[in-house]
Amino acid sequence: MELASAISPLGVGLDPDYAEFVERFGGCYVGVPVYGLRNSDLLEHVSVVDLTLRFRRDGWPGTDRGLVVSFDPAGNPLVLTPGGPVTSYDHDAGRAYELAQGFAALLDQHTED
């Protein structure tokens, strides 16, 4: 799979729900921006790999444990850990917090049935 090969140098596993989503839809906006390898015109043209590397270079806590698949309106990264929660680090508050139990739960929070 192209995505698995692309993220391999990052040293993190691939969440299966996220992999299926970006394989089907690419990066797109679904109530929250979700970055992939190729994104819709609604999103910045940056891959999930580049986004993750950018936040890692800038020293954001927690970005070494997963993929930065999005960021909030304040610019805080949303980090998807393989098989685990989606977390974020609020630089204003100086703390990490869990946003959702996983990628599917994150989508459920931001989309209507």
Image (spheres, rainbow, N blue to C red):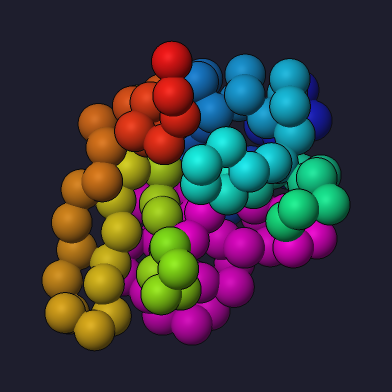
Instruction: Tell me the residue at 70%/41% (across/down).
Output: 27
Instruction: Tell me the residue at 51%/42% (across/down).
Output: 31
Residue 88 visible to the viewer: yes
Position of 22 with respect to 65 (left or right) is right
Camera-side residue of 73 and 27 = 73
Camera-side residue of 4 and 50 = 50
Instruction: Tell me the residue at 48%/82% (across/down).
Output: 58
Q: Which percent across, then down, holds residue 107?
A: 44, 30
Position of 81 with respect to 95 (left or right) is right
**Magenta stretch: includes residue 66:** yes
Q: Which percent across, then down, holds residue 97?
A: 18, 56
- Give the quadrant of residue 103: top left
Residue 9 visible to the viewer: no
Residues drawn in magenta: 44-71
- Which quarter shows the N terminus? top right
- Give the quadrant of residue 76: bottom left
- Which quarter shows the C terminus? top left
**Magenta stretch: includes residue 63:** yes
Placement of 60 over or under 23, stated as above or below? below
Q: Which percent across, then down, holds residue 20?
A: 62, 19
Q: Which percent across, then down, holds residue 41?
A: 84, 52
Instruction: Tell me the residue at 41%/36% (across/down).
Output: 110
Position of 36 with respect to 100 (left or right) is right
Placement of 79 over or under 44, stated as above or below? above
Position of 11 with respect to 63 (left or right) is right
